Amino acid sequence: MYRVILASALLLAGSAALSKDSYRERQEARDRTELAKALDGFTAGKPTSCIDPRRINETQRIGDTIIYKASRRELYVNDTGGGCFGLRNGDAIVTKSYTGQLCRGDIVTTVDLPARIPSGSCAFGDFIPYRK
């Protein structure tokens, strides 16, 4: 009896792990597709370390990537590399800037506003400009 219970528990744990991995793979594939669609028609430029947040009109989040739109013809893409779990949930993005710009290495914190609870943190990478 003990063997049957142990075997069932191991089988259940293994299938749960496989399900979680396949979910993550599907989500990453969706993110790649959505990012490709958002960047369709744009050409990547040379990465830059900082951008001026006063030029940003709109922000879009796709997985661990934040797209800062300066205009219809210019946007900046930043891959945070993970850790900002609230990006996917639509939590607020809070940044601390000591230079008046958003720069590589600045810490990004996501906050669940109704609960006022931080949901993750990560750092900016390079900002890649895209232009039409």
Image (spheres, rainbow, N blue to C red):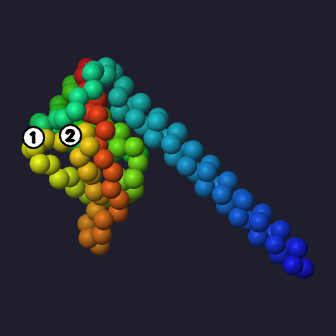
Give the x, y percent position of residue 66. 31, 42
Give the x, y percent position of residue 70. 17, 33
- Screen quadrant of the N terminus: bottom right
Kindly indicate the quadrant of the structure image that contains residue 18. Answer: bottom right
Q: Residue at x 31, y 20 (%)?
A: 43
Q: Is residue 131 above or below residue 90?
A: above
Q: Residue at x 36, y 53 (%)?
A: 84
Position of residue 75 in the picture relative to residue 90 (left or right): left
Q: Is residue 89 above or below residue 2?
A: above
Report crowding for label 1: few under 14, some 14 to 19, many 20 or more residues within 10 A (C-alpha): few
Q: Which mark is residue 34?
A: none
* Residue 75 at least partly seen: no
Q: Secondary structure at mark 1?
A: helix
Q: Which mark is residue 54?
A: 1
Q: Residue at x 12, y 37 (%)?
A: 52
- Label 2 sits on residue: 103
- Screen quadrant of the C terminus: top left
Report crowding for label 2: few under 14, some 14 to 19, many 20 or more residues within 10 A (C-alpha): many
Q: Residue at x 72, y 59 (%)?
A: 14
Give the x, y percent position of residue 103. 20, 40
Q: CA distance from mark 2 to mark 1?
A: 13 Å
Q: Nearer the viewer, mark 2 or mark 1?
A: 2
Q: Name the amino acid type tagged 1.
A: Arg
